[in-house]
Image (cartoon, grey):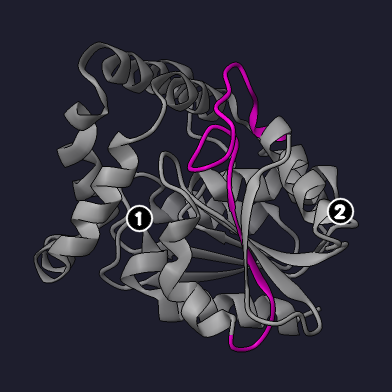
Amino acid sequence: MKLHSTIHGVRSGTGFVLLHSLALDGRVWQRVVTDLSQRSQVVTLDLRGHGESPTAVGFTIEEMADDVVETARGLDIDQAVVVGMSMGGCVAQAVAVRHPDFVSSLVLADTTAWYGPDAVDAWAGRANKARAKGLRSLADFQLDRWFGESFRRAEPELCADLLKCFAANDIDSYASACNALGAFDMREEVRSIGVPTEVVVGEHDPATPPDHARDLTDRIPGAELTVIPGARHITSMERPDVLVAAALRARDRQ
């Protein structure tokens, strides 16, 4: 599936492909793009069922990964630093496993190789609540997971824009993405990743806590871990400087 893409900056050397979190879209990277695009080409994608990409049902994380590579190659991008956050981090892992020739290095932020033994039921429950009560019913839950209280107070307009983006999702696509995350388990496959990898997580991330990041770091040969003090789940907004630094380290470790 061809995805909606936005190209930032000027192509020069190895570029960056950025993959967003669940129920948001490429705009979640705007603060990272501001810096990275001054150095190289940056491509933000709206993943399957999200943003301006086609709605979809019944898909897997692996199929989302194939979408990323198909779209990038359609833009004449043969290799990139792949940066994924949350759901996008799951997709980035699958890209690195399924298309190792495409990935020059990898950044995995606020993500996991597996959501745990209750993942199928937990994610199905979230999808069912969205269907029954609408995405707005999850707004407070999401905002508390994304950012700490001080950030929410300091950035009310940003938070409102993200919630508007979240609530605008197609319900069937959102439910399918939830089910895909519930089924996701790449704990063994990531051991085959052979490119420089930076793992980043917020200290207080309630969605994919630091233990998930440490486990991921231990499984990927040579991976390096950064824990961001005080941060929660959407670190591309809360601490874009750390994400930019991780992306540049990953690129420079090639």
Label 1, label 2: how far apart the Cα atoms are: 27 Å
Identify the residue at horizontal 51%, vertical 24% (top origin).
182
> Which quadrant of the view contains residue 242?
bottom left
Query: x and y percent of residue 96 in the render?
Result: 77, 51
Identify the residue at horizontal 15%, vertical 40% (top origin).
140
Structural crowding at the residue carrying mark 2, measured as other residues with C-alpha within 10 Å and reported as few (<14), some (14–19) or many (≥20): some
Q: Total number of numbered labels?
A: 2
Q: Specify start and end residues of the magenta stretch as a single range.
A: 38-62
Left or right: 165 with respect to 147?
A: right
Please name the residue that numbered disc 2 is placed on.
100
Q: Amino acid at mark 1?
A: His
Query: x and y percent of residue 100 in the render?
Result: 86, 53
Left or right: 135 with respect to 70?
A: left
Q: Amino acid at mark 2?
A: Pro
Between 199 and 107, the residue placed more toward the observer is 107
- Local SS, label 2: loop
Please name the residue that numbered disc 1 is placed on.
233
- Residue 43 on the magenta segment: yes
Query: x and y percent of residue 135 in the render?
Result: 27, 28
- Residue 194 on the magenta segment: no
Between 190 and 11, the residue placed more toward the observer is 11
Identify the residue at horizontal 31%, vertical 14% (top origin).
131
Which comes sooner in the sequence, label 1 or label 2?
2
Image disc number at residue 169: none
Identify the residue at horizontal 70%, vertical 82% (top origin).
10
Structural crowding at the residue carrying mark 1, measured as other residues with C-alpha within 10 Å and reported as few (<14), some (14–19) or many (≥20): many
